[in-house]
């Protein structure tokens, strides 16, 4: 069984943090800090563990934030230019060289709470921390408190030689960052963020470009037409890296069948004979699978690029249905030619969905347009 994710924060991590803090401030109560930070640790989940460590830091570090901040900076390991946060060992807390890895998470939160009145100094601490792990969550209180000042500071580092810092600028400004506090100012008006992304879109590191794409995907949830316009502009003369970025940025819009984005990627209105959809059986049991075949015949004199998706319209408890789009395949359909393809869709129990017995539908989308659909019945153990 894999190690629970919450165990990125262990008593080992806490003791190493205490060791480094005391090394740079002799009055630090190492024993007291460890006791408070590790109190009932096994019963706490990841974010609660991190929050408890942050609270212990607030209690045992100096009340003078300038002094506390210098202790944090002195406790950091040498900056990393090679690894991404995802690849850093959870227990990377080097006793000789300083703190890195997940230990940075509660340290960054401490800066976001205690250092809000010390903007310039706090931002410099977060910049140093982000190259040892990431401080994408910790910068958000500063954006909320002083968006213009924070963006001005971030923009001065947008060409920093450390790719962790460049990625932090994109990731920290995502309007809807998972796990992070939302940024209503950028949800309403993403223009200041897009200015930063324009600079970062051709970054030499895939790690940075991936963050740019995720930021744009966030923005697309509230401003689909704006992101569609950006995609159209960025794809002009785009190399392979930028094409990959834009496709990832538009993944939500592509799933939704946004016609402007589809056209930007070369997916025009399909010219087809009526697509024939057939089911192996119109009765499917939970833990079984739906097997269906799609037959297509081109009605065009030219080859067509087709993005084929399918939708399962799941039965809800109240009798209505809820659609879920699934990716199928991208194909080139030759002029006036026939093509057939088959798909198996499993109905397995998952934690994010409750299945209800009754009428369901499978619908085929080609280049974002509904082509054909069929009804089937799902049986469950509760029937």
Image (cartoon, rainbow, N blue to C red):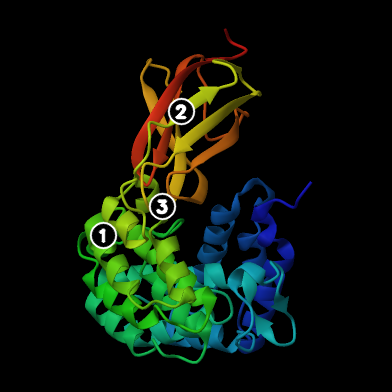
Gap in angstroms between the C-alphas marked 1 and 2: 42 Å
Circle number at residue 204 = none
Q: Which residue is mark 1?
A: 187
Gap in angstroms between the C-alphas marked 2 and 3: 18 Å
Q: Quadrant of residue 368?
A: top left
Q: Which residue is mark 3?
A: 304
Please provide percent x and percent y for residue 255. 40, 47
Q: Which residue is mark 2?
A: 276
Q: Secondary structure beneath disc 2?
A: strand
Q: Secondary structure beneath disc 3?
A: strand
Q: Residues within 10 Å of mark 3 (few under 14, many from 20)?
A: many
Lower sequence index among marks 2 and 3: 2
Please provide percent x and percent y for residue 352. 53, 35
Q: Secondary structure beneath disc 1?
A: helix
Lower sequence index among marks 1 and 3: 1
Considering only vertical position in the picture, is 329 above or below 375?
Answer: below
> Cβ–Cβ below 8 Å for labels 1 and 3?
no
Q: Quadrant of residue 100?
A: bottom right
Please provide percent x and percent y for residue 320. 36, 19
Q: Residues within 10 Å of mark 2 (few under 14, many from 20)?
A: some
The C terminus - image quarter: top right
Q: Quadrant of residue 143?
A: bottom left
Q: Is residue 140 left or right of residue 355?
A: left
Q: Is residue 264 left or right of residue 383?
A: left
């Amino acid at each position: 069984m894999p190690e629970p994710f919450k165990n990125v924060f262990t008593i080992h991590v806490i003791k190493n943090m205490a060791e480094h803090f005391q090394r740079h401030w002799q009055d630090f109560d190492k024993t007291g800090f460890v006791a408070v930070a590790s109190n009932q640790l096994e019963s706490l989940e990841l974010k609660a563990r991190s929050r408890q460590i942050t609270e212990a830091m607030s209690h045992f570090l100096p009340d003078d934030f300038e002094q506390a901040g210098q202790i944090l900076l002195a406790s950091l390991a040498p900056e990393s230019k090679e690894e991404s946060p995802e690849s850093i060992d959870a227990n990377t807390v080097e006793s000789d060289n300083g703190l890195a890895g997940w230990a940075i998470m509660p340290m960054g939160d401490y800066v976001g709470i205690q250092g809000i009145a010390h903007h310039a100094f706090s931002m410099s601490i977060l910049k140093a921390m982000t190259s040892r792990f990431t401080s994408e969550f910790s910068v958000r209180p500063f954006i909320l408190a002083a968006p213009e000042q924070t963006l001005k500071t971030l923009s001065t580092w947008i060409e920093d030689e450390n790719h962790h810092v460049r990625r932090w600028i994109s990731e920290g400004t995502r309007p809807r960052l998972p796990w992070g506090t939302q940024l209503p100012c950028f949800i309403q008006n993403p223009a200041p963020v897009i200015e930063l992304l324009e600079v970062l879109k051709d970054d030499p590191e895939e790690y940075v470009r991936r963050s740019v794409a995720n930021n744009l995907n966030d923005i697309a949830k509230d401003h689909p037409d704006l992101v569609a316009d950006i995609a159209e502009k960025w794809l002009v003369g785009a190399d392979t890296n930028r094409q990959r970025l834009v496709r990832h940025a538009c993944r939500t819009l592509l799933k939704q069948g946004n016609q402007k984005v589809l056209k930007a990627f070369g997916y025009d209105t399909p010219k087809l004979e009526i697509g024939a959809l057939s089911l192996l059986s119109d009765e499917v049991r939970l833990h079984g699978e739906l097997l269906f075949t799609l037959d297509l015949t081109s009605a065009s004199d030219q080859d067509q690029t087709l993005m084929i998706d399918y939708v399962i319209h799941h039965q809800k408890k109240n009798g209505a249905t809820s659609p879920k789009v699934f990716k199928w395949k991208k194909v080139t359909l030759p002029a006036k030619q026939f093509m057939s393809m088959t798909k198996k869709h499993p109905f397995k129990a998952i934690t994010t969905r409750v299945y209800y017995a009754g009428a369901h539908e499978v619908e085929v989308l080609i280049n974002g347009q509904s082509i054909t659909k069929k009804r089937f019945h799902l049986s469950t153990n509760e029937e």
